[in-house]
Image (tube, coloured by chain):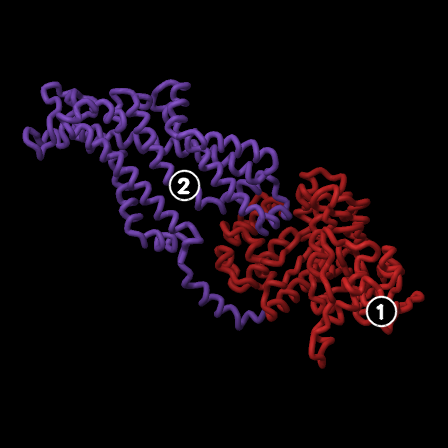
């Protein structure tokens, strides 16, 4: 090639190429819902991080003379307890703020657990194929056949109730989704020529699986993990509501709901606010997941 | 001295009972520093032969060979890890579609340096700076303008020709003794094709490596190769040096391939073509594999599969190898027009 002619041309072409991150951000920010989701999640993260500083009262402190006080804008409310108090006089707002911490932690840990095991199993199934794949995938099909909450309850029944065990249970329930997704993505990628050329360069099975193929399967897994966050939070709340998750006095949203159920007629705020918190958090993660999918999925790109 | 020796290579896919025969008893030897071309239609087993030689035919495929020797080492008896170490370093391969051959997730620098980290010299394996220097040197060697910027590029930011140059750089990164180029220019523009071929040949000369060029483009072969191996339906049908094989093909298939070149059809209304297609899994003929498509086929061709006849440097798999004037020899007599196989052709 004649370098004198070609190089200036090549340089002008290369210069305006946008960075990967900026390109990604541009397509993510196109959807308003995704931005709202992201803003909510950032807010929730800040609440969780600075829960001790922000919340006006300790979450488990019982102010016995102020039981079931309504929120401040209702009659009988006071600015001391902005969202009112629960049946034993604990400040709702402080408990909700501390509950954010727990909910995010539950989401993070159960998603991290099921994502890592799911990806491991899925990559093995998709790369090795044959009987290994059949056994793994049929096992996942069996797990998918059970209603998710029922399976979670069964797992907690075996492990015993508690927050940590609830996380394990949720991780197990979420597992098949990641396995199936990872397997499908690996099968699609494994036939491509760059995998072949990597094999020719002497790459072994492990390197091919995790260094060559896996990064190319990241997009659908990231989306699924974000969406999995919301179902983990929801499942944790459900387990908490059934008394199988976080145990009192832990300020977990689901168990807060359960503990205040009998007062729903007399003091609706004790049920409304934890429910709203769950709703907003789940919505935020779903919005962000959808935005990520639009931004990361090449098939939906304009 | 032969660098790569393949003797009686068989590759089959599918069931044991009715296998798809991809490669059927291929013998192939490539000398040090030689440019050999593997030529044939799609489906004639060119690429599978190369992949089998590198031990890369995956499970449903079955590979058998009497001898598979690379640079004095028997590839058949080597363990998996040893073969990977040998093959990755001393045999390199580039493919038809350069953009698909680069991992879309990583930059050029990462992919080049990964190869060097595994197969490079001692300094390159241990020292990231040495790897970077070598990567830059390689990009300059394959004539990529502005190599510093290209190192940071992702594959989707490269053009096809640029990506093929990067692939070549990766292939020669460990100074291989043998480079297999599987249709290296098919996916490229004609002008870029010429540049990439020139580059390949220059590197082949400078590095003293052997080059196996897999292609169906006879024009490329005529310009580049010293020796041609013509394959058909998994068999070698003719071998010979350039330009002798082009001036006087001895096998009817080679003759037909050459006749189908546009350059040989200047003043005709229609391009000369070979009737029919390469036999597949269920219609592999008895006798000579070419006979349903061969203009010279006679009773003996339908009955008896020919061997490779002739001196080792000029062989043809035909009962009636063609002479210098392009006519069958060996007592060939045209059949009367009632031959039943004519209908299938």
Letter of the chain in purple: A
SS for tag 1? loop
Q: Position of residue A43 (x, y in %)?
A: 25, 40
Residue A168 shows in this picture: no
Q: Which mark is residue A224?
A: 2
Quote the CA–CA distance across marks 1 and 2: 68 Å
Q: Which mark is residue B19?
A: none
Can you name the residue that lies furthest to the left here?
A: A75
Left or right: where B171 falls relative to B31: left
The answer to which image quadrant residue A230 occupies is: top left
Chain containing the residue with disc 2: A
On-image quarter of the N terminus of chain B: bottom right
Letter of the chain in red: B
Residue on which the image places disc 1: B337
Identify the residue at image location x=64%, y=51%: B174
Left or right: where A291 falls relative to B2: left
Identify the residue at image location x=54%, y=32%: A136
Answer above or below: position of B244 versus B117: below
Identify the residue at image location x=13%, y=32%: A82
Q: Are marks 1 and 2 on the same chain?
A: no
Left or right: where A159 falls relative to B209: left
- Around disc 1, counting alpha carbons within 10 Å, would you say few (fewer than 14), some (14 to 19), or many (20 or more)? few
Q: Position of residue B79 (x, y in %)?
A: 71, 37
């Amino acid at each position: 090639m004649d370098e004198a002619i070609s190089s200036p041309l090549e340089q002008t072409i290369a210069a305006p190429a946008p960075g990967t991150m900026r390109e990604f951000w541009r397509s993510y920010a196109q959807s308003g819902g995704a931005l709202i989701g992201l803003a909510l999640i950032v807010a929730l993260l800040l609440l969780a991080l600075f829960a001790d500083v922000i919340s006006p009262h300790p979450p488990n402190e019982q102010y016995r003379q102020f039981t079931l006080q309504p929120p401040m804008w209702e009659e009988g409310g006071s600015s001391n307890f902005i969202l009112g108090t629960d049946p034993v006089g604990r400040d709702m707002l402080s408990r909700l703020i501390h509950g954010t911490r727990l909910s995010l932690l539950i989401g993070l840990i159960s998603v991290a657990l099921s994502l890592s095991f799911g990806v491991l199993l899925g990559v093995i199934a998709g790369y090795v194929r044959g009987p290994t794949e059949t056994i793994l995938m049929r096992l996942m099909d069996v797990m998918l056949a059970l209603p998710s909450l029922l399976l979670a309850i069964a797992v907690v029944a075996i492990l015993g109730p508690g927050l940590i065990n609830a996380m394990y249970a949720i991780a197990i329930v979420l597992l098949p989704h990641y396995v199936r997704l990872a397997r499908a993505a690996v099968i699609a990628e494994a036939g491509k020529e760059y995998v072949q050329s990597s094999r020719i360069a002497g790459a072994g099975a492990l390197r091919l699986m995790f260094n060559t193929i896996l990064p190319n399967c990241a997009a659908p897994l990231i989306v699924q993990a974000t969406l999995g966050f919301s179902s983990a939070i929801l499942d944790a709340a459900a387990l908490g509501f059934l008394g199988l998750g976080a145990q009192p006095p832990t300020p977990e949203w689901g168990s807060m709901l359960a503990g205040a159920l009998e007062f729903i007629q007399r003091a609706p705020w004790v049920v409304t606010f934890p429910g709203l918190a769950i709703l907003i958090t789940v919505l935020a993660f779903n919005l962000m997941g959808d935005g990520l999918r639009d931004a990361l999925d090449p098939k939906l790109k304009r | 001295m032969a660098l790569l020796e393949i003797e009686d290579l068989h590759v089959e896919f599918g069931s044991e009972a009715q296998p798809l025969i991809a490669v059927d008893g291929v013998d192939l030897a490539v000398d040090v520093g030689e440019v050999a071309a593997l030529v044939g239609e799609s489906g004639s087993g060119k690429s599978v032969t190369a992949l089998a030689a590198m031990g890369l035919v995956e499970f449903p495929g079955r590979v058998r060979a009497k001898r598979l020797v690379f640079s004095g080492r028997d590839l058949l008896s080597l363990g998996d890890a040893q073969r990977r170490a040998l093959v990755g370093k001393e045999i390199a391969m580039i493919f038809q579609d350069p953009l698909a051959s680069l991992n879309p997730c990583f930059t050029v620098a990462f992919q080049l340096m990964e190869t060097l980290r595994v197969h490079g010299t001692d300094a390159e394996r241990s020292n990231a700076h040495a790897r970077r220097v070598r990567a830059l040197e390689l990009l300059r060697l394959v004539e990529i303008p502005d190599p510093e910027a290209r190192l940071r590029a992702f594959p989707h930011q490269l053009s096809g020709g640029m990506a093929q140059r990067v692939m070549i750089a990766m292939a020669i990164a460990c100074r291989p003794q043998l480079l297999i180029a599987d249709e290296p220019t098919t996916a490229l523009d004609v002008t870029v094709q010429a540049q990439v071929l020139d580059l390949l040949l220059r590197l082949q000369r400078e590095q003293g490596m052997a080059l196996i060029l897999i292609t169906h483009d006879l024009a490329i072969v005529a310009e580049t190769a010293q020796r041609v191996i013509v394959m058909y339906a998994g068999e070698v049908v003719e071998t010979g040096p350039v330009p002798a094989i082009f001036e006087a093909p001895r096998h009817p298939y080679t003759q037909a391939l050459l006749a189908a070149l546009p350059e040989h059809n200047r003043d005709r209304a229609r391009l000369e073509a070979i009737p029919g297609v390469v036999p597949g899994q269920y219609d592999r003929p008895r006798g000579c594999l070419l006979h349903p498509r061969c203009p010279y086929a006679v009773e003996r061709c339908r009955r008896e599969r020919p061997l490779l006849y002739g001196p080792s440097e000029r062989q043809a798999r035909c009962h009636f190898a063609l002479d210098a004037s392009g006519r069958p020899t060996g007592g060939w007599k045209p059949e009367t027009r009632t031959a039943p196989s004519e209908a299938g052709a």
